[in-house]
Image: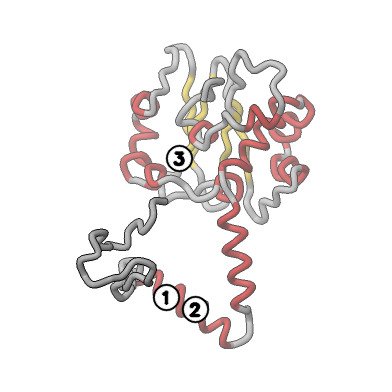
Amino acid sequence: MAPHDGHDHDHAHGHGEQHGQPHPHRPIQEDLSYRTESAVRARALKELLIEKGIITADEVRRQIEIVDARGPHMGARVVARAWCDPEYKKRLLTTPNAACAELGIDLGETHLFVVENTATVHNMIVCTLCSCYPKTLLGIPPDWYKSFAYRSRAVREPRTVLAEFGTSLPDDVEVRVHDSTADLRYLVLPRRPEGTEGWSEERLAAIISRDSMIGATLVRPDA
């Protein structure tokens, strides 16, 4: 970050500041834009639970840290292992929750279903009702995944939507769209790109993107 970034200083020091002296700051204004009705209710509930001794502020903080630590890198580890280990791939496709647990990834109550992309089938994930998503593996969903345009068009015109992501598929490749629910979340197992033979799991994981595990894009070795 550049020095004094966002601090609105007058670098000509025309307001009487002396070199070496602390720069006066304007009073920090609290951003109240996040105070939606649901956010206010959630905060009130949290404070009530803490006040009643049901949870502690530290427990809340630790849970937030756990959620913040989740991201596409976790799903990428799972996919990379499946690419390198055929037996693990079988377990991932049949018992995905247990397979993820092998890598220390606890999916909790999430019921995960893994769909594999092949030379003849391309899978795409959507939640037509809201934004159900495998957060325990991929973190917070992108804004476009939650948008009404994606949720409606992915079902009606999946090839057109894929093309807008730069994903062009041959006509003989079937596109299957899977609708997530509150009880069932999907993860796409992308096809391993040619030219990655002999790569380590770490190197493979580095080219696996969030969007490829939703089915919006393909994995490319030059990513």
Amino acid type indicated by mark 1: Arg
Q: Position of residue 184 (x, y in %)?
A: 57, 47
- Residue at the image point whose x is 70% and y is 52% from the top: 106
- Mark 3–mark 1 Cα distance, whole angstroms, equals 28 Å
Q: Residues within 10 Å of mark 3 (few under 14, many from 20)?
A: many
Q: Is residue 34 above or below residue 145?
A: below
The disc label shown at residue 53, or none = none
Quadrant position of residue 199: top right
- Residue at the image point whose x is 63% and y is 32% from the top: 205
Quadrant position of residue 80: top right
Q: Position of residue 220 (x, y in %)?
A: 53, 21
Between disc 3 and disc 1, whose residue precedes?
Answer: 1
Between 5 and 28, the one nearer to me in the picture: 5
- Residue at the image point whose x is 39% and y is 34% from the top: 155
Mark 3 = which residue? 126
Mark 1 = which residue? 41
Q: Is residue 81 left or right of residue 47?
A: right
Between 184 and 191, the one nearer to me in the picture: 191
- Residue at the image point whose x is 35% and y is 46% from the top: 147
Q: Is residue 97 left or right of residue 15?
A: right
Q: Please report contact status of discs 3 and 1: CB closer than 8 Å, yes or no.
A: no
SS under mark 3: strand
SS under mark 1: helix
Q: Is residue 180 above or below residue 189?
A: below
Residue sticking out furthest to the left:
14
Q: Position of residue 209 (x, y in %)?
A: 53, 33
- Mark 2–mark 3 Cα distance, whole angstroms, equals 31 Å
Amino acid type indicated by mark 2: Leu
Amino acid type indicated by mark 3: Val
Quadrant position of residue 119: top right
Mark 2 = which residue? 45
Residue sticking out furthest to the front:
19
